[in-house]
Image (cartoon, rainbow, N blue to C red):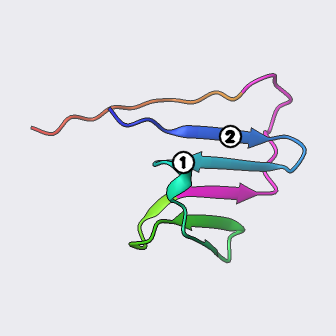
Amino acid sequence: MDKIKVVHDVVGQTLTVWFDDPKKEHICEETTEEVVLMKDTAGRVIGFELLHYRPVESTTGLTVETIVQTRP
């Protein structure tokens, strides 16, 4: 199973999610929704960053729900 890396920067107010190795990042593209897409050399999205992210509640962690779907 592939790993996903999630980084919440409280000071910078960002939430970054990586689907692949961050070292493969080649270019970043900001969308109009204040989301930055990180892409590899082939143009595939390998991660994204939400700008101005603040959790709704003040907590000491980030809850992540994992849903695994299998194909027939």
In this rendering, position of residue 19 left or right of residue 53: left
Residue 34 versus residue 46 in the image, above or below: below
14, 59: nearer the viewer: 14
Residue kind at label 1, given as amino acid type? Trp
Q: Residue at x 15, y 39 (%)?
A: 71
Residue at the front extreme of this rendering: 23
Distance CA(mark 2)–CA(mark 1): 9 Å
Residue 72 versus residue 21 in the image, above or below: above
Instruction: Give the class, few, some or many, for how many residues have Cα within 10 Å of label 1's Cα (few <14, many ≥20).
Output: some
Q: Earlier in the sequence, mark 2 or mark 1?
A: 2
Q: Residue at x 50, y 58 (%)?
A: 24
Q: Quadrant of residue 57?
A: top right
Residue kind at label 2, given as amino acid type? Val
Q: Which residue is mark 2?
A: 7
Is label 2 in a helix, a strand or a loop? Answer: strand
Q: Which residue is mark 1?
A: 18
Determine whether label 2 and label 1 are within 8 Å by CB. Answer: yes
In this rendering, position of residue 42 left or right of residue 50: left
Quadrant in which the C terminus appears: top left
Q: Position of residue 53 (x, y in %)?
A: 78, 50
In magenta segment, residue 57: yes
Q: Magenta segment, which residues? A: 47-61
Q: Quadrant of residue 25?
A: bottom right
Residue 61 versus residue 43 in the image, above or below: above
In this rendering, position of residue 46 left or right of residue 28: left
Q: Position of residue 48 (x, y in %)?
A: 59, 57
Is label 1 in a helix, a strand or a loop? Answer: strand
63, 37: nearer the viewer: 37
Considering the whole magenta stretch, tell me its main secondary structure: loop
In this rendering, position of residue 26 left or right of residue 51: left
